[in-house]
Amino acid sequence: MLRDLGPWVCHIRWLIWVMACVGSMYVFLFHERYKLIELLGYVSMGVVPALVILSMGERSGVCELAVGGVFYTVGVIFFKSDGLVPFAHAIWHLFVAAGACVHYYAIWRYLYLPGPPLKTSR
């Protein structure tokens, strides 16, 4: 946690841990039996942390995080098109890499570059 994310962050953190535990049990018990449930679980684990944005005081870098999230989400279309679209799995990996690069840039630019300190809501 490199900056103040507002009052919701504690609740979201616990929700992500619960989702990870439930997902681990799901994979252990029903691996690839219900693919739609699995997909919805992965997408929700990616989207739910974005709710923290609603309680953040300082929102610099949020645009880059949203663009990265769009890359990940659009990539899901290709992930589900494996076998229908040629090289769909490889295209999905490109979208994941693009999303990761944008998120890395956002962290580098707004949290690590020297400059004036970020304002916090305290």
Image (cartoon, helix red, strand yellow):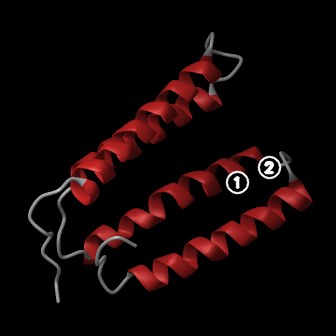
- Amino acid carrying mark 1 in the image: Ile
Residue at (62% x, 74% y) in the render: 17
Residue 120 in the figure: left or right of residue 47:
left
Q: In the structure shown, which secondary structural element does the residue marked by tag 1 occupy?
A: helix
Q: Where is residue 90 in the image (x, y as percent from the top left)?
A: 61, 20
The answer to which quarter of the image holds residue 37 is bottom right
Determine whether 20 is above or below 79 in the image: below
Comparing 6 with 54, the one in front is: 6
Q: Residues within 10 Å of mark 2 (few under 14, many from 20)?
A: few
Residue 57 in the figure: left or right of residue 47:
left
Please give the label number shown on residue 49.
none
- Amino acid carrying mark 2 in the image: Tyr
Residue of label 1: 37
Residue at (75% x, 45% y) in the render: 35
Furthest residue toward bottom: 122
Q: Position of residue 120 (x, y in %)?
A: 17, 79
Q: Where is residue 96 in the image (x, y as percent from the top left)?
A: 51, 35
Residue at (42% x, 32% y) in the render: 98
Residue of label 2: 34
Determine whether 7 is above or below 45 in the image: below
Furthest residue toward right: 29
Residue 68 in the figure: left or right of residue 40:
left
